[in-house]
Image (tube, grey):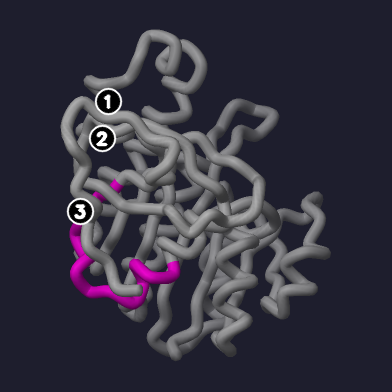
Amino acid sequence: MRPLLIFGASKGVGLELARQERSCGRTVFALVREQSDAGGIGTAGAIVLRGDALKAADIAHVFEHVREECDVVSTLGGQSADGRRADDEGNVNVIAEAERTGRVSRFVLVTSIGCGEMAPFRSDRAIAAFGAVVDAKTRAEERLRTSGMPWTIIRPGGLLSEPATGRGILSDDPEIHGFIHRQDVADLVSRALRDPATIGQALAAVDAGRMTCVRAVRPFPILA
């Protein structure tokens, strides 16, 4: 298996993905900020590299550790004290360096429901609460689409921390909304990395038992 680089792996979906990939023997590198707790990702068996995604030099340093063909997943998000967002700036740094190396076989960007073509279907409440974040993530999506790399965008609904249900699905319907457990998102990302049918797709991720849509939902077919 190709090595996997995860950006945004100290917690949440990134951490769950690292655990899943390490359990099947894959080599995982993870960028973790200096001030972040790396205990979970270290216990998972990932190779921890310290740095800040808002610094292009730190991103380049991560890629220097992998001199072979690899896959990349970014779940980056959050805002620095000076107002800069990893949702766009950090992700763009990762995308640009991955593109520059020419060694990335698959790039999966994890953003959010409401990004891109889903924007017109956001509620006023969602815009007020998360509009700036979603807009920032959309800018990262747009940069990835023009990168020339084989890309996939996965947009989770509201994230839950309870154990996986196994009901996670992907959908290309721009009007779908719902919730999904972090472990289920990680499973979908892992499967997407292995399924070439997901290349060039931007897909919402929701729990089949906790979703709403104006039309009948046909899950995007993905390898088990």
Tell me which label, 3 or 2, sits earlier in the chain: 2
The residue at which mark 3 appears reads as 146
Q: Mark 1 and mark 2: span between their CA atoms?
A: 6 Å
Task: Please tell me whether residue 194 is drawn above or below residue 215 in the rendered image.
Answer: below
Which of labels 3 and 1 is toward the front? Answer: 1
Residue 68 horizontal/vertical position (percent): 43, 89
Residue at image coords 39%, 67%: 98
Q: Is residue 201 magenta?
A: yes
Q: Mark 3 and mark 2: span between their CA atoms?
A: 14 Å
Residue at image coords 58%, 71%: 61
Q: Is disc 2 surrounded by few (<14), some (14 to 19) or many (20+) residues within 10 Å?
A: some
Look at the numbered discs 1 and 2 and tell me whether their residues touch, using CB distance below 8 Å: yes
Type of residue at label 3?
Thr
Residue at image coords 71%, 72%: 48
Which mark identifies residue 119?
1
Element at badge 2? helix
Quadrant where the N terminus is found in the figure: bottom left
Residue at image coords 61%, 62%: 16
Look at the numbered discs 3 and 1 and tell me whether their residues touch, using CB distance below 8 Å: no
Residue 26 horizontal/vertical position (percent): 55, 86
Q: State left or right for residue 199 relative to residue 122.
A: left
Q: State left or right for residue 16 relative to residue 207.
A: right
Q: Is disc 3 surrounded by few (<14), some (14 to 19) or many (20+) residues within 10 Å?
A: few
Type of residue at label 2?
Gly
Which mark identifies residue 116?
2
Tell me which label, 3 or 1, sits earlier in the chain: 1
Q: Which residues are magenta?
A: 190-203
Quadrant where the C terminus is found in the figure: bottom left
Q: Mark 3 and mark 1: span between their CA atoms?
A: 20 Å
